Amino acid sequence: MYLKKNIFTRRKVFNFISGFACVFSSKLSFAENKIGSPFRDRFQSYRQTFRIEPDPEEAKKIVRNIIKGREIREDLIYLRAPDIAENGNTVPISFSVNCSMEGEDYPKIVHILVLDNPFPEIAKFYFTPESGEASVDIRIRMRTSSNIIVIAEMSDGTVGETKSFVDVTIGACT
Amino acid sequence: MANEERKNWRRRLRVPISALQGEIITIKTMAEHIMEPGVRRDPETGVIYPKKIIDLVICRFNGKQIYKSHWFSGVSANPFMSFKMKAITSGLVEVEWVDDYGQSTYKKAVIMVYDKNGKKIIPMKLDKASSNKEVM
């Protein structure tokens, strides 16, 4: 009789129930991954200050800074890109620079730019004479149908440039 | 979440097993990665996904850097890239991918280069390697 009285006191029952309630509530609060886990939220306020719309003047400025008023050599770069790209998320392009990779006749840096993207720079490639041919295949993102520009800076100081227009049906959101 | 993270670390590298001396070989690389451009929003909540891309790709041959490329947010997800290399001696090809957060992964492969007579071209001298045993 004495034991039974002790087990079911009001205080003990209340503690038992409140403990369960605590566990359930904490589980619910931690499981809200849908709204945004802490990893996603960390840079949110910082990223929202970035512009998302493309700025054509800034794209031209980037090209001007690379070329710096030098004469453009023709027939230096051979660029292969599709005329029509169905999906803007993966547009396969490839280029090759027409030069013998000996002495000072090799490209130091090759830039790829898409002017209508919000961030027009896509990739830079640094070559050395050990890489026997300056040719690369890569897949890129495009927002709308626009020009792809490839600029090669040779180690002599000369510059080559080619363009090709690509039609994009479904654009990527870069 | 854990499965997504594990996918981001998978890398592939394809290098031919053998080549003739002076031949130009292609190296194909592929990284499984969500190249998050930092512009995309969650359709339900409007939260911007933070930028997470692969910045740097470095290729080294026998410890010497022969090729490097900087990537920005315009490279597509699961980025594929192939480039060329001149086979002079047989050795080790290493490709390293460096993340936006400074996390790096690498893959390596071995290539054997043969002479026209069918002789292996090895970067180190065999006499010196055998003499090292006595020292050890």
Image (cartoon, coloured by chain):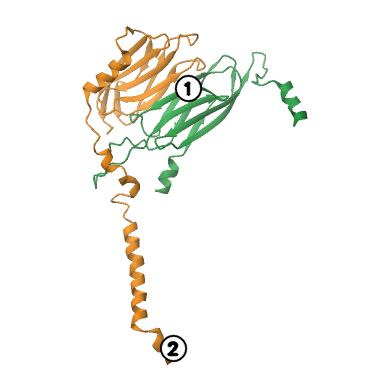
Type of the residue with mark 2: Leu
Residue nearest the viewer, comparing B52 with B11:
B52
What chain letter is assigned to the residue under label 1? B
Residue at mark 2: A3
Residue at mark 1: B67
Q: Secondary structure at mark 2?
A: helix
* Residue drawn at (35%, 61%) of the image: A27
Q: Left or right: A45 with respect to A77? A: left
Location of residue B41 in the rendering, given as x and y in whole percent from the top left corner: 26, 41
Type of the residue with mark 1: Tyr
What chain letter is assigned to the residue under label 2? A
Instruction: Tell me the quarter of the picture where residue A10 sits.
Output: bottom left
- The answer to whether one can see residue B41 in this image is no
Q: Colour of chain B?
A: green
**Quarter that holds the C terminus of chain B:** top right
* Residue drawn at (66%, 21%) of the image: B124
Location of residue A141 in the rendering, given as x and y in whole percent from the top left corner: 32, 29
* Residue drawn at (39%, 88%) of the image: A5
* Residue drawn at (43%, 26%) of the image: B81
